Image: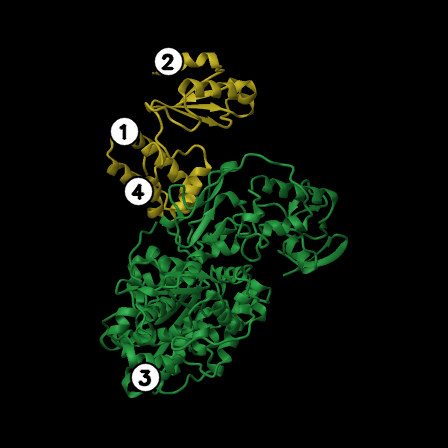
Chain colours: A yellow, B green
């Protein structure tokens, strides 16, 4: 079984090593179609995003059509088919965050970064996405940048938060 | 199976356990308005049009997926149901172009029919349209996403019935679109071009790539001699385009209509079906002889190669098993090759000035004629393929009163055919035709079966098999004495994959397999008139066998014009010229 530590070491891997790790993942999951979502998760963890090449690799090894793999992964907003920036900024738009101003935060971020939701800045630093409830309603409106959660954000705080990262 | 008693619209009825409300109502002459439902094919309740009120239930229920329960009380026409049905319909329309007058499905559209049925007068919801992508990369199929109403019938047919899986839903909500993966187009995917998605599409989102203009241009070009040929399955379905019952035989009227359209020669693909039997039958006997006597040479089972959807499927999915395919071109390709050589010589016309049109029940044939293998001496074997539906449209366009046409015959020398050729149009037919000839070639006796039919191979079952014991063969076939020849027949690509898996695992017990890409065979091909249900299939199938039995000539090898062709031109089956003109090769394609 591929371990979490191994996944964490992907940055230093070659493409070939990444593909062979993905194949190992598929074996761990018996190449079963019912495990496709887990395999896609691991694929995204290894490659950062699910390119047409990676999709096709998964489809071929699992003996299912490309179209099927693409159908499943495009259904879930978590999966990305394009490279992500260094930082993925995600705004929660679940009910609590929405009513506490999540939408204004999204609009301000679009303005600051000059990208739309689902896009990545040209310098590949920031990607912007929205999420449904992440279970942090008490912190509404909540935002995550990579794995870190920011609480009670408002449009005025954004410049400072992003500035600290850059 | 126990019986359930329930009430629908104050009528007490009984239905078998497991029946849906929709089916129970239908059996009792109540047709609940519905849309995405397709009997025996697609029952997932995606459009919700078939909702009904069930007493005690919190919400309206989709009747096509809700099973009957004891003492259930169902209402199909309450104010609430009728109101919701209209709203649902209007919501579908809110994301539909509604340019019906400019749509090829005008007056032949299930969305229009439904609107009429539930008495719509006006649209209340207008908004942004979700998509407007037209994919015309395929040689066979054009997909217009703007018209798609996301019923997912094509998804079900492509995945569940055909096992191809190129049509799927991508993204979600308003952004949902149906098609191959977002980085692919139909023309560059594993699509087999079978066209079963077109047959089930309720609207104009899927259609064949139009060739009518190309054919009109050729017909009106004075420098072209335009030759047409018709596949066996067309003659038992074309009438439906003119309001005739499914299974009406219109062979004679079809030939007349083609002359009225201006074709110079009206030939019959059936002639080449008889030719196929001689070529493929000889190839089969050669393979069996090689295997039984030397255990060397080409492998068994041999599989038929008439169905181009099947061929592309096997090239993608089983590219390691291509040696099982017969090397015969499909019949219309053989006829095309003969028109441009044998016939061109006869009428002293430069093959380059000949334009060959095939009228086919098939969309995959449009792809087939583009294959690089399908030419002889630098001239394409066939120049255009029209589906049965397209021919129907041309006849209407030309103002020809089809129903009033007199019957006429096909032209000579490529028009005569046996009943064995007619049954090429249905599942089991190619195999039966081959058995009629091969048995007689081997034993010198006629096939000892009632009306020459191999009964276990008749009908719509997914996989059919038969055993044929050879006793007292002629001297030259002595190696077959006591051999039981095992054959299998399947239609629809899912059935084909079952037989192919057996072959791949080395467990296939068969010598000869017939595969037709579409369920039921060419009678329900992707180019045939809609709608196609099992009852329509059966009517067309019966008509095909009537066509066969109506002929005095029942066996391919007794076709005199065919014998003349061999004498004057080809020499003998599998000869040098046959090899050059009538046989082909296959390519390995990517699995995905």
Crowd tier of the residue under label 1, counting other residues whose Cα lies within 10 Å: few below 14, some 14–19, many 20 or above: few
Q: Name the residue under label 2.
A: A163
Mark 3 and mark 1: Cα distance apart in space? 69 Å
Circle 2 packing at 10 Å, graded few (<14), some (14-19), many (20+), is: few
Q: On screen, B441 above or below B95? A: below
Q: Name the residue under label 4.
A: A23
* Horizontal side of residue A6 vs B112, given as left or right: left
Mark 2 and mark 3: Cα distance apart in space = 89 Å
Marks 2 and 4 in Cβ contact (< 8 Å): no
Subunit that carries the residue with mark 2: A
Foreground residue among B18 and B107: B107
The mark closer to the camera, 2 or 3, is 2
Q: Position of residue B186 (x, y in %)?
A: 40, 49
What's the CA distance linking mark 4 and mark 3? Answer: 52 Å
- Residue A11's mark? 1
**Residue behind mark 3:** B481
Residue B251 percent location from the top left of the image? 51, 72
């Amino acid at each position: 079984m591929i371990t979490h530590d191994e996944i964490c070491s992907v940055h230093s891997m070659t493409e070939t090593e990444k593909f062979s790790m993905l194949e190992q993942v598929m074996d761990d999951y018996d190449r079963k179609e019912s495990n496709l979502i887990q395999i896609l998760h691991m694929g995204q963890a290894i490659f950062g995003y699910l390119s047409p090449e990676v999709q096709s690799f998964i489809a071929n090894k699992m003996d299912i059509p490309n179209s099927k793999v693409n159908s499943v992964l495009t259904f879930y907003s978590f999966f990305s088919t394009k490279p992500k920036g260094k930082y993925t900024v995600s705004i929660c738009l679940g009910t609590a965050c929405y009513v506490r101003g999540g939408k204004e935060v999204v609009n301000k971020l679009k303005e600051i970064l000059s990208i739309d939701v689902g896009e990545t800045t040209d310098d590949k630093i920031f990607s912007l996405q929205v999420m449904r409830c992440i279970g942090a309603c008490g912190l509404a409106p909540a935002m995550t940048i990579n794995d870190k959660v920011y609480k009670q954000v408002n449009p005025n705080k954004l410049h400072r938060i992003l500035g600290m990262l850059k | 199976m126990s019986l359930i008693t329930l009430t629908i619209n104050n009528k007490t009825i009984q239905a078998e356990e497991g029946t849906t409300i929709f089916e129970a109502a239908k059996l009792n002459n109540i047709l609940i308005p519905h849309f995405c439902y397709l009997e025996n094919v697609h029952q997932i309740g995606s459009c919700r049009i078939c909702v009904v009120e069930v007493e005690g239930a919190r919400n309206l229920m989709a009747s096509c997926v809700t099973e009957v329960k004891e003492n259930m009380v169902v209402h199909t026409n309450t104010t609430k149901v009728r109101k919701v049905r209209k709203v649902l319909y209007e919501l579908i329309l809110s994301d539909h172009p509604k340019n019906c007058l400019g749509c090829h499905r005008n007056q032949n559209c299930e969305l229009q029919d439904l609107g009429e049925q539930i008495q719509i007068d006006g649209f209340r919801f207008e908004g942004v349209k979700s998509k407007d992508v037209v994919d015309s990369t395929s040689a066979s199929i054009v997909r217009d996403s703007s018209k798609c109403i996301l019923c997912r019938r094509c998804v079900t047919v492509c995945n569940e019935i055909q096992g191809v899986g190129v049509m799927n839903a991508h993204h979600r909500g308003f952004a949902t679109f149906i098609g191959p993966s977002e980085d692919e187009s139909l023309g560059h995917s594993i699509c087999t071009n079978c066209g079963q998605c077109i047959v089930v599409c309720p609207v104009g989102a899927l259609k064949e790539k139009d060739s009518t203009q190309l054919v009109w241009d050729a017909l009106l070009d004075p420098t072209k001699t335009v030759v047409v040929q018709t596949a066996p399955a067309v003659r038992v379905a074309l009438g439906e385009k003119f309001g005739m019952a499914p299974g009406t035989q219109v062979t004679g009227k079809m030939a007349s209509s083609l002359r009225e359209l201006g074709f110079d020669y009206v030939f019959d693909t059936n002639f080449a079906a008889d030719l196929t039997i001689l070529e493929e039958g000889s190839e089969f006997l050669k393979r069996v002889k090689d295997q039984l006597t030397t255990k060397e040479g080409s492998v068994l089972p041999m599989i038929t190669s008439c169905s181009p959807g099947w061929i592309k499927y096997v090239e993608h999915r089983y590219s390691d098993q291509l040696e099982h395919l017969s090397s015969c071109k499909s019949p219309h390709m053989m006829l095309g090759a003969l028109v441009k050589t044998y016939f061109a010589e006869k009428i002293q016309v430069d093959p380059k000035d000949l334009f060959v049109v095939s009228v086919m029940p098939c969309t995959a044939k449009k792809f087939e004629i583009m294959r690089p293998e399908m030419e002889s001496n630098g001239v394409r074997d066939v120049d255009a393929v029209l589906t049965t539906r397209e021919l129907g449209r041309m006849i209407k366009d030309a103002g020809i009163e089809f129903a009033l046409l007199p019957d006429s015959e096909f032209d000579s020398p490529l028009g005569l055919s046996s009943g064995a050729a007619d049954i090429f149009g249905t599942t089991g037919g190619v195999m039966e035709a081959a058995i009629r000839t091969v048995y007689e070639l081997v034993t010198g006796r006629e096939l000892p079966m009632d009306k020459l039919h191999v009964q276990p191979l008749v009908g719509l079952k997914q996989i059919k098999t038969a055993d044929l014991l050879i006793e007292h063969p002629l001297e030259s076939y002595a190696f077959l004495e006591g051999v039981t020849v095992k054959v299998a027949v399947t239609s629809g690509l899912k059935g084909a994959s079952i037989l192919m898996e057996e072959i791949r695992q080395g467990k296939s017990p068969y010598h000869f397999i017939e595969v037709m890409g579409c369920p039921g065979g060419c009678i329900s091909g992707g180019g045939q008139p809609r709608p196609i249900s099992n009852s329509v299939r059966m009517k067309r199938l019966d008509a095909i066998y009537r066509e066969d039995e109506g002929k005095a000539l029942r066996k391919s090898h007794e076709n005199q014009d065919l014998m003349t062709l061999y004498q004057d031109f080809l020499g003998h089956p599998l000869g040098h010229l046959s090899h050059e003109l009538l046989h082909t090769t296959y390519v390995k394609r990517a699995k995905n």
